[in-house]
Image (cartoon, grey):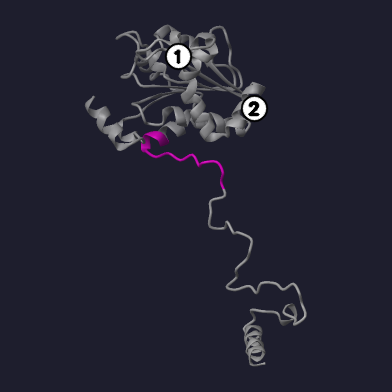
Amino acid sequence: MEAFMTKRSAIKNQVREGVLDSREFLQDAKVRRLPPRNGWSPYPSNDERDQGYLKTLKPKSDGQAELMDAVDAHNLVLALGPAGTGKTYLAVAKAVEALEAGKVGRIVLSRPAVEAGESIGFLPGDMEDKLAPYLRPLYDALSDRLSMKRVKALMAEGLIEIAPIGYMRGRTLNNAFIVVDEAQNCTYVQLKMLLTRLGWHSTMVVTGDPHQSDLLPGVSGLSDIAERLEAVPEIAVVRLAERDIVRHPLVASMIGVL
């Protein structure tokens, strides 16, 4: 009896404090609700979490901010700079952003299949299988902005096309966002051919590091092309520097001495 009285006193206290509704705590009730304490709810609250599933595209340096502004304002942009400055990532991210916003109808990503001291002849499979490792950085950048399932679906629909530079001759790319990666491994003739693929309602971003070419000295045409196009007002040439490197700090230190 004494225990029952103590229990009733506790219930009265909870009712007085507005924590418990006595009608929900009947003596004969078989199912009782948990009394809410301090606003607790069995349903998880995500109010304090970031609800964005897509990473917000923000520049991490002044050079990256200049590159992003240039892509928004020009139809042809050349982004030159050392490794780790985010040239490829920003270009692909801007391409995905334009596709999602309906500004372009497709994305075309191109990259030269030039060996970095090794030959692709030993790799198994057909030509597509041999080229896959060279196009992997583009896949990585795409999958970071879109799910891999979505990337495969868009590629199956032809909205995303990844092609080596050798397959670009003779094409006119209208209503597209074109990204030419690793352009330092292109000759002057190849770059001239690529730049003239630009069609109506299209944007092209060419990225590369003139000091990291895998071609023989003097064969790369990126530096010469950039110097010539820098005089054209409608074309933006953005030169990134060591201060724009966003990889491990050791990368910037190595670039400075190597």
Residue 181 in which image quadrant? top left
Q: Callout 2: few (<14), some (14-19), or many (20+) C-alpha neighbours within 10 Å?
A: few
> Of circles 1 and 2, which is in front?
2
Q: Is residue 58 magenta?
A: yes
Q: Is residue 37 left or right of residue 89?
A: right
Q: Quadrant of the N terminus?
A: bottom right
Magenta-tinted stretch: 52-65
Residue 33 among those drawn in magenta: no
Callout 1, which amino acid?
Pro
Q: CA distance from mark 1 to mark 2?
A: 24 Å
| Of 101 and 219, the residue lying toward us | 219
Q: Residue at x 56, y 31 (%)?
A: 96
Residue 164 in view here:
no
Where residue 13 sits: x, y (%)? 62, 86
User: Relative to 64, is 3 on the left or the right?
Assistant: right
Could you tell me which quadrant the C terminus lies in? top left
Mostly what secondary structure, the magenta segment? loop
